[in-house]
Image (cartoon, grey):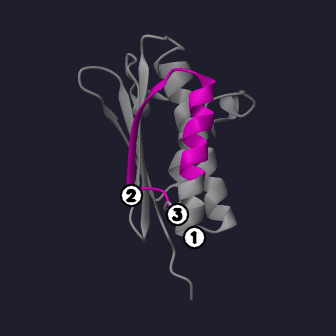
Amino acid sequence: MADQHSPAEVKEELESTLESVDHAEELVMRTAREMGFDEDQQHEIGISLRECMVNAVVHGNRYNTRKKVHFTVSHTAERLEIVIGDDGDGFDSNKLPDPLAEENLLRQSGRGVLMMQAFMDEFTVSRRDPRGTEVRMVKYKTKSE
């Protein structure tokens, strides 16, 4: 019988579609469950993954079929790491409008980065070479008392 556990690292080049968002989410959530993250942690990981993938597809690659989403999920017994890159023009995360500012509170978008930062233990944004943006997110398993 084949081993049903997720491999320690999966690296894929995905199409710039919302189906790719669903595919990445299924893969990451299966890994998170297998690692033993609790329900709240799984929820935080799922929201962070979806926000990041949608940003790569919609804002980074603008659904361009020639552009790919570069997706890696890796894990050890104690940490889950997700790296998502796009082939877009890149952006400066320091120039994002403050989603908590009064003038932005009712906007429909603009909270994804804030949620990813809040839900994940590590969150970094960098430029991809030769172009695009790469987001790295890490979630650590908390030791049960």
Element at label 3: loop
Above or below, 132 against 66 in this view is below
Residue 36 image label: 1
The mark lying in front, picked from 1 and 3, is 3
Name the image quarter holding residue 108. top right
- Can you name the residue that lies furthest to the front here? 1
What amino acid is labelled 3 in the image? Met
Report how far apart the C-alphas of labels 1 and 3 lie in the structure.
22 Å
Q: Which residue is mark 3?
A: 1
- Can you name the residue that lies furthest to the right here? 106
Does the magenta-highlighted stretch encompass residue 69?
A: no
Which class describes the residues within 10 Å of circle 3: few (<14), some (14-19), or many (20+)? few
- Can you name the residue that lies furthest to the left here? 130
Report how far apart the C-alphas of labels 2 and 1 lie in the structure.
15 Å
> Sequence-wise, which precedes: disc 2 or disc 3?
3
- Residue at screen point 24% across, 25% down: 129
The mark lying in front, picked from 2 and 3, is 3
Which class describes the residues within 10 Å of circle 1: few (<14), some (14-19), or many (20+)? few
Front position in the image: 82 or 108: 82
- Residue at screen point 67% across, 63% down: 40
What amino acid is labelled 1 in the image? Gly
Q: Position of residue 70 (x, y in %)?
A: 39, 31
Element at label 1: loop
Does the magenta-highlighted stretch encompass residue 15?
A: yes
Which class describes the residues within 10 Å of circle 2: few (<14), some (14-19), or many (20+)? few
Q: Which residues are magenta?
A: 5-29
> Sequence-wise, which precedes: disc 2 or disc 1?
2
Q: Are marks 1 and 3 in contact (CB under 8 Å)?
A: no
Residue 8 image label: 2
> Sequence-wise, which precedes: disc 1 or disc 3?
3
What amino acid is labelled 2 in the image? Ala
